[in-house]
Image (tube, grey):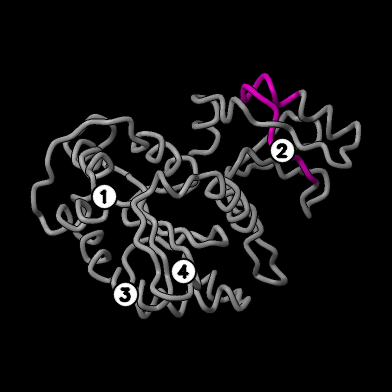
Amino acid sequence: MYKKIILGALISAVFATSSFAETAASPEVAALGDKLKPIFGDKPDSIKPSPVAGIYEVNFGPETLYVSADGRYFFSGDLIDGQTRTNLTENARTEGRKSEMAKVNASDTVEFKAKGTEKHVLSVFTDVDCPFCVKLHNEVPKLNEAGITVRYFGYPRSGIGTASYKKLVNIWCADNRQEAMTKAKRGETVATKDCDNPVAKEFELGQRIGVNGTPALVTDAGIMIPGYRTAAELVKILDDIKAGDKSAATAVN
């Protein structure tokens, strides 16, 4: 899912507005950031020693790669702790996703609020032409009853400017987004409308955090849950993650 980190970084210059976190940065770490800037177009958000001697973990938002101390060699992929069986790279990605999702204004999403006390917020990247997105939407009332707010993000799999993209724009520009989303998921036509909308921005966000299919679900903690799950499955997963059950997070990938 995340094997295009380096290519994406070189094409888009990663995050042009990223700020290099130099909390307690040694001169060596600062120098490494300077060496990486010409390669990626900007300094990383953070650099820290990995558990492997001479190798640093470098983060550009939710993207993680590993770099030699001299800045010459770098690679992408999962770093696994063989003793604990912990995916250290996925942990870093999760923190990156959490940070990226926290920047989103809820008013830019199509939100179906939890009934009563809100226990969780589930972000869902959706495409109205995706059959499993339709199935998931049918579970939304049950999720709301269970105290889960669902926030939809537009993710037209066919890309910006396509028919699927325009359908999503119609939803985001509708007077009642929730009603328009439900109509579209039922296969009904939503009135054509245009406005200043965040669909393209949300599509780009999805690409940054590793979405490569729909539905793609992201929890409060930044954990990605790929694909369709029933409401009952999602309630259990979210409750287990909130309770600190690390196996629940591992099981969803």
Q: Nearer the viewer, residue 137 or 77?
A: 137
Q: Earlier in the sequence, mark 3 or mark 1?
A: 1
Residue under label 1, please give it. 177
Q: CA distance from mark 3 to mark 1?
A: 23 Å
- Residue 75 drawn at (x, y percent): 62, 40
Q: Which mark is residue 67?
A: 2
Q: Callout 3 environment at 10 Å: few (<14), some (14 to 19), or many (20+)?
A: some
Going by the numbered disc 2, the residue's amino acid type is Val
Element under disc 1: helix
Residue at 55 percent across and 30 percent down: it is: 9
In the rendered structure, which disc, 2 or 4, sits on the residue that comes first in sequence?
Answer: 2
Q: CA distance from mark 3 to mark 4?
A: 13 Å
Q: Earlier in the sequence, mark 4 or mark 1?
A: 1
The span picked out in magenta is 35-48
Amino acid at pointer 4: Val
Q: Nearer the viewer, residue 209 or 69?
A: 209
Separation (CA) of disc 2 from disc 4: 28 Å
Q: Residue at x 62, y 44 (%)?
A: 64
Q: CA distance from mark 4 to mark 1?
A: 29 Å
Where is 27 relative to 54, above or below? above
Q: Is residue 168 above or below residue 224?
A: above
Classify 10 Å Cα crowding around label 2: few (below 14), some (14-19), many (20 and above): many
Count residues near mark 4 (Cα–Cα under 10 Å), then give few for <14, some for 14-19, many for 20+: some
**Magenta segment includes 159:** no
Instruction: Indicate which disc residue 230 carries.
Output: 3
| Residue pointed to by mark 4 | 252
- The front one of 38 and 83 is 38
Please tell me whether residue 43 belongs to the stretch shown in magenta.
yes
Mark 3, secondary structure of its residue? loop
Q: Which amino acid is tagged 1?
A: Arg
Sequence-first disc among 2 and 3: 2
Query: What residue is shown at x 20% (from left), y 40% (from top)?
Result: 170
